[in-house]
Image (cartoon, rainbow, N blue to C red):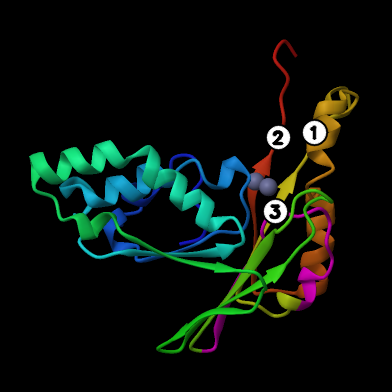
Amino acid sequence: MFDTGRGVAQRLVQAGIAPAQIDRLFFTHYHSDHTVGFADFWLGSWLPAGGGRSKPLKVAGPIGVQALIDGHRIAFADDIRIRVADQKLPIEGTHIEVASHSECGVLFNENGLKVTSFEIFHGKMIKPNWGYRIDYAGRSVVIGGDSNNDRSVAKIAANADLFFHSVGAADETLLKFPEIARILQHHTTPQQAGEIFSVARPKMAAFIHIVTPSRPGL
Ligand SMILES: [Zn+2]
Ligand SMILES: [Zn+2]
């Protein structure tokens, strides 16, 4: 699985996947909209209703992943202690094996499944920030990650079977607010993403992470 945004545990269940079936997680970057679902996913997967995880979860990502996981362990130490004592849940199901990477490259390569990370520009201060390419049995999926019109992804996603690209857009009345303009400066417009798709020529392209900022009162 890649990132844990809001509602990830619910989305897994809606898709017919028990959270405990996910044994590996990769993070793209540490904006909260990519991480706030982690606690619900992690601890929910340990509960019987989430599939009753009994083995460690493996989590990989760019620098920052260790702090994110360590912080969660501290925050939920009491919950874990209580459930082990009270519900007799196996403590191993809460363990997390963290792989913190300072450089992009192949992060996983087993049984013909390869996961490769690549850097992508999201904003001058938003680093590290990665996308991922997944290859298996001659098929490929590219998750572009959050990005600001970074054309380098077109080469990575060339002829991919499936290419996900995040986008953001707002109408002109909203763009005059600096806080909204700043958000949009960190994203790719649907038009720009379309141009990237036309260069990469994937078999299927999809917009994801559709940012449509709003402003209370408007
Ligand atoms: Zn982001
Ligand atoms: Zn985001």
Determine the image quadrant of residue 21. bottom left
Q: Nearer the viewer, mark 3 or mark 1?
A: 3
Q: Which label's residue is closer to the chain start, 2 or 3?
A: 3
158 above or below 22? below
In the picture, which quadrant includes the C terminus? Answer: top right
Rounded to the nearest angstrom, the CA distance separating label 3 from label 1 is 17 Å
**Image x and y of residue 140, in percent:** 57, 79
- Image position of 27 (left or right of 205): left
For residue 151, side relative to residue 51 (left or right)? right
Q: Residue at left 40%, top 89%?
A: 111
* Residue 169 falls in image quadrant: top right
Query: Label 2, on which residue?
Result: 212
Q: Is mark 3 within 8 Å of ligand 1?
A: yes
Q: What range of the chain is rendered magenta?
A: 138-155
Q: Secondary structure at mark 1?
A: loop
Please determine whether, in this image, residue 58 is positioned above or below residue 208.
below
Is residue 83 magenta-colored?
Answer: no
- Residue type at mark 1? Ala
Q: Residue at x 52, y 46 (%)?
A: 35
Q: Amino acid at mark 3?
A: Asp
Query: Which residue bears the numbered disc 1?
Result: 170
Please give the residue where the numbered disc 3 appears in the rendered image.
Answer: 146
Q: Secondary structure at mark 2?
A: loop
State whether label 2 is within 8 Å of ligand 2: no
- Mark 2 is on which residue type? Thr
